[in-house]
Image (spheres, rainbow, N blue to C red):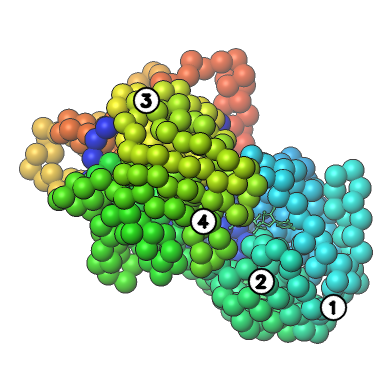
Amino acid sequence: MDKFRIIGGKKLKGGVAISGAKNSALPCLAAALLTPETVTLRNVPYVRDLITMRRLLEDLGCTVLVPELRTHQINAGTVEDYEAPYELVKTMRASVLALGPLLGRFGQASVSLPGGCAIGQRPIDLHLMALEKMGAKIELRGGVVEAGASRLRGADIEFETVTVTGTENVMMAAALADGVTRISNAACEPEIVDLAELLTKMGAKIEGASTPTITVTGVERLGGADHTIIPDRIETGTFIVAAAITGGEVEITNCEPGHLQSVIEKLREVGVKIEQTGRDKLRVAGNGESRAPYKAADVTTAVYPGFPTDMQAQYMALMTQAEGDSVITETIFENRFMHAAELMRLGAQMRINSRSVDVHGPSPLTGAQLIASDLRASASLVLAGLAAEGETLIDRVRSKIEDRRSKIEDRRSKIEDRVGARKAILYPRSSIFDLRSQPAFSSGNTTRWLTTISAVTTNSFIFFWLGRVYIASSINSSRIIRRPRAPTLRSQAWRATARKASSVKRNLMPSHSNCF
Ligand code: EPZ
């Protein structure tokens, strides 16, 4: 887990390119288990969960090559193990996505039951119910789901609750089943459609993705495919709020505005200036010239195309700066308000009820020490930290690793283009990388330091901020500084193992892998 220190209170300005969607890349990587041929996935975000998923596939016997950052070539021709162990499942619930494809292709799977998490119990009973309806024999032994079937058969599946990964697991299992599977009350998220597109390229017969009724006609075998992952709509939404909460201006590129219409509409309703400047471009100008405070507005999370639960925490942070009272109601997860109490530590005025929070604003926020509970909560605390006066310290930030080097290069080239002649004055080429020469930032630390900074939520805005802030700091802007921890015995031991591990990894991944 990481710790962030944020000095806030300044506008954000600049541009950022959105990464691929974490919640689409995860099921797409798992789908590669359905064929012995190579599946090439592009625009894969370089985030911790994807690294865990890649490790799971390798442990099952797959070969995963990364010819260039964000491109993964997965070959499941040599799978010899069908177990997703607890060590991996406990770090990433999405490991459960191996269940459907392993059962569908090999007729057996052993997946550790993912326990609860900060945002809710999150059972997988609907996944298991569906697979049993398709003929799987499922037993729960020692916290592990043992599933077996000679060959799954098509079935009519009605989900009592819309479940995203449940729909994905059944689609993948049904792709190789004998007969037709009809999923009713299916999830309609863009990530479901993206997975259906990949499976169709692999030879699956799927109709109705993006609607509540999906029909899958099983086939004998599936082949390889080449697929590009959609942009991350939650990352996009988080950037929009980042610009809005600091009254800044941000150009967002490589995004898919159509995938977050409900978020854009709600933010426009409260007064955020959002302009679509291209097919995949948005320009966010906070509250524009008027600097009129945002208007408070209620929101209720819902399944797609409703307001996404993964944007609820970030929206709550913004509502602390809006004029009036807003009620934020969470309908998807039963315990997704852990960030609310932390926001109150910054000075936000709220009353937390069982499934809703009443927010009164605007409240001036002042920096404080906070603890993050999950990925999206981390993002909302960082957003609020940037709007707060003074220093905010956030502990247990669930971070993600974004490929710093290429983002640094992108940023630096953009910045240098912009500052052109003033480069020598403001930001000599080597300054960022000189960090490596600082003893406190010796290689292991630098990697962890940069990794940490470029984390939070599914995107690199911290990075962007850092890039920006780092450079702008000589201009005027908020700063994010991270105090490197003194290397403890354990971290030295860890680094020794990491060095050994990374020497192994180096064979699999291209040169920049050592930033992992
Ligand atoms: C997916 O989780 C996303 N994760 C979540 O994003 C997202 O919040 C969620 O969908 C809702 O949009 C991935 O795609 C990897 P669900 P998932 O099954 O599939 C209940 C993030 O921050 N339920 O749609 O696990 C469940 O408890 C994460 O990126 C059952 O009761 O969510 C919840 O209340 C967080 N039984 C509701 O359904 C089941 O078998 C929706 O959960 C399955 C689900």
Under circle 4, the secondary element is strand
- In the displayed structure image, the side of residue 471 where residue 295 appears, left or right: right
Image coordinates of residue 249 in percent, x first then y, are 23, 50
Q: Secondary structure at mark 2?
A: loop
What residue is disc 2 on? Answer: 186
Residue 86 position in % (x across, y down): 77, 42
Residue type pointed to by label 4? Thr
Three-letter amino acid code of the residue under disc 3: Gly
- In 3D space, how far apart are the residues under numbered discs 1 and 4 (Cα atoms)? 38 Å
* Tag 4 near tag 2, CB within 8 Å: no
First in residue order: circle 4 vs circle 2: 2
On-image quarter of the N terminus: top right
- Rate crowding at label 2 as few (under 14), some (14 to 19) or many (20 or more) other CA atoms within 10 Å: many
Q: Earlier in the sequence, mark 1 or mark 3?
A: 1
Label 2 CB-ligand 1 distance < 8 A: no
Mark 3 or 2, nearer chain start = 2
Q: Nearer the viewer, mark 1 or mark 3?
A: 3
Whether label 2 touches label 1, CB < 8 Å: no
**Quadrant where ligand 1 appears:** bottom right
Q: Residue furthest front?
A: 325
At x 85% / y 53%, what residue is drawn? 145
Q: Which label sits on residue 367?
A: 3
Label 3, label 2: how many angstroms apart (C-alpha)? 43 Å
Q: Earlier in the sequence, mark 2 or mark 1?
A: 1
CA distance for labels 4 and 2: 20 Å
Could you tell me which residue is drawn at 44 percent across and 44 percent down? 316
54, 389: nearer the viewer: 389
* Location of residue 283 with respect to 11 vertically, above or below: below
Name the residue type under label 1: Arg
Marks 2 and 1 sit apart, C-alpha to C-alpha, by: 19 Å
Report which residue position mark 1 lands on: 153
